[in-house]
Image (spheres, helix red, strand yellow):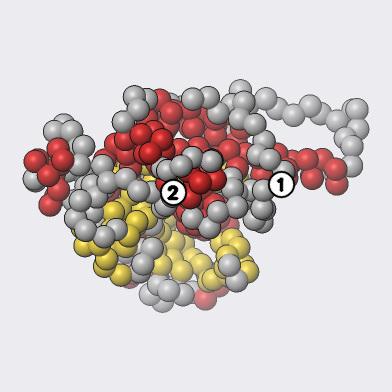
């Protein structure tokens, strides 16, 4: 499967601000897609996901390479998060009663861990893994019935996140920062691994996390801001949300001051909703830049929302482990294509509104 020469979608399809849906369908499951394609039933689509021989990981490589080719940016942000897929019964791979951020409560669901790639021109998903609770991996016969190979063992969501970021680094995906919510950022060992690889990051954490300071090896982050002077707090936006700019008070305190001179460690606090972040970054990084990276974490929520609404990310009718990864990969390919098309539209609009550059202007730098 090649994505580089993917055609533009037909112009008569319904449009949604920010993206162009692949078909005017409220749900994009096997039956509705089969009817739209003129098939008498969903058998062909089910065979594509369950029985036809094709390499899912090679297609995922295509998706990632396509995104890098068209949206690649050395300042991009890699974002890790998980999302739930509500399910009935106990036969869907990885399904059990567990917390679902989608539902906001404990439900019978599957949980997928995803990696998003966010730039100023667009954001989309570039990796995915289905989380398998220990109740599944401890029952190998149950796993075999769901198409889960014996080599697949239990991994925490943090371990899955590590593997996906490592793959992005190995595949030389250009990016400048990493970020994640507290479910991932709380892991000291992962933060240490990122620092050892010199990967700049702003990770959310909990108030119970501890850091190294001049006064203690394990200093609670929530104690760092008690009595901090009012002028140290800056009112800033961390990006736009559904109800406009997300404006909060922010402050930062430096920790681990004896580290290498060209790098800094900061703890950042936002008293509204009591949020804390731990940052590793170049010494010259401003508070405004750290706030921007912290706020970029919500880009992956936008990816989940648009991929579910427009690309059928959650409209699947497969139970087996390989089928889940196939469906997610194909939905991600569609989302990546729509994101690139949208970026092209924005580029064209900008070219029409911007004045032409003088012939004496400096030529843009090629980042290779």
On the image, numbered disc 1 is attached to which residue? 12
Identify which residue is drawn at 30% across, 53% down: 111
Residue 104 is left or right of residue 141, and the answer is right
> Which percent across, then down, holds residue 368?
61, 23
Identify which residue is drawn at 54% across, 45% down: 36
Q: Mark 1 falls on what kind of element?
A: loop
> Which percent across, then down, holds residue 364?
74, 29
Identify which residue is drawn at 49% across, 32% down: 63
Please say if the residues under marks 2 and 1 sit with CB atoms less than 8 Å apart: no
Q: Residue furthest front?
A: 40
> Which percent across, then down, holds residue 365?
70, 27
Q: Is residue 221 visible?
A: no
Q: Mark 2 falls on what kind of element?
A: helix
Q: Residues within 10 Å of mark 1 (few under 14, many from 20)?
A: few
Residue 173 sits above or below residue 245 on the image? above
Which quadrant would residue 330 be assigned to in this image?
top left
Residue 200 is left or right of residue 205, and the answer is right
- Which of the two discs, 2 and 1, labels the residue nearer the N terminus? 1
> Which percent across, then down, holds residue 236?
59, 66
On the image, numbered disc 2 is attached to which residue? 31
Closest to the observer, 212 or 37: 37
Q: Residues within 10 Å of mark 2 (few under 14, many from 20)?
A: some
């Amino acid at each position: 499967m090649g994505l580089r020469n993917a055609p533009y979608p037909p112009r008569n399809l319904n449009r949604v601000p920010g993206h162009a849906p692949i078909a005017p369908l409220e749900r994009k499951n096997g039956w509705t897609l089969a009817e739209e394609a003129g098939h008498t039933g969903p058998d062909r689509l089910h065979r594509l996901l369950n029985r036809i021989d094709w390499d899912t990981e090679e297609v995922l490589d295509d998706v990632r390479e396509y995104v890098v080719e068209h949206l690649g940016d050395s300042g991009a942000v890699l974002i890790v998060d998980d999302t739930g897929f509500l399910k009935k019964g106990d036969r869907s791979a990885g399904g059990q009663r567990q917390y679902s951020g989608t539902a906001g409560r404990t439900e019978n669901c599957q949980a997928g861990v995803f990696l998003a790639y966010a730039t100023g021109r667009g954001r989309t998903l570039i990796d995915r893994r289905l989380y398998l609770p220990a109740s599944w991996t401890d029952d190998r016969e149950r796993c075999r019935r769901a198409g889960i190979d014996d080599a697949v063992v239990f991994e925490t969501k943090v371990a899955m996140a590590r593997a996906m970021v490592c793959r992005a680094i190995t595949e030389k995906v250009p990016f400048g920062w990493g970020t994640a919510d507290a479910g991932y950022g709380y892991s000291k060992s992962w933060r240490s691994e990122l620092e050892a690889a010199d990967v700049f990051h702003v990770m959310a954490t909990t108030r119970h996390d501890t850091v190294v300071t001049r006064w203690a090896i394990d200093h609670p982050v929530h104690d760092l801001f008690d009595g901090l002077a009012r002028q140290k707090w800056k009112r800033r936006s961390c990006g736009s949300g559904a109800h406009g700019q997300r404006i909060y008070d922010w402050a930062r305190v430096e920790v681990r001051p004896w580290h290498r001179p060209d790098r800094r460690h900061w703890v950042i606090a936002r008293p509204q909703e009591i949020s804390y972040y731990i940052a590793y970054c170049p010494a010259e990084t401003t508070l405004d830049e750290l706030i921007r990276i912290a706020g970029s974490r919500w880009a992956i929520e936008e990816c989940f929302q648009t991929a579910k609404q427009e690309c059928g990310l959650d409209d699947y009718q497969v139970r087996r482990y390989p089928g889940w990864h196939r469906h997610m990969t194909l939905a991600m390919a569609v989302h990546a294509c729509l994101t690139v098309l949208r970026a092209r539209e924005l580029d064209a609009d900008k070219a029409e509104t911007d004045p032409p550059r003088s012939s004496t202007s400096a030529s843009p730098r090629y980042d290779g």
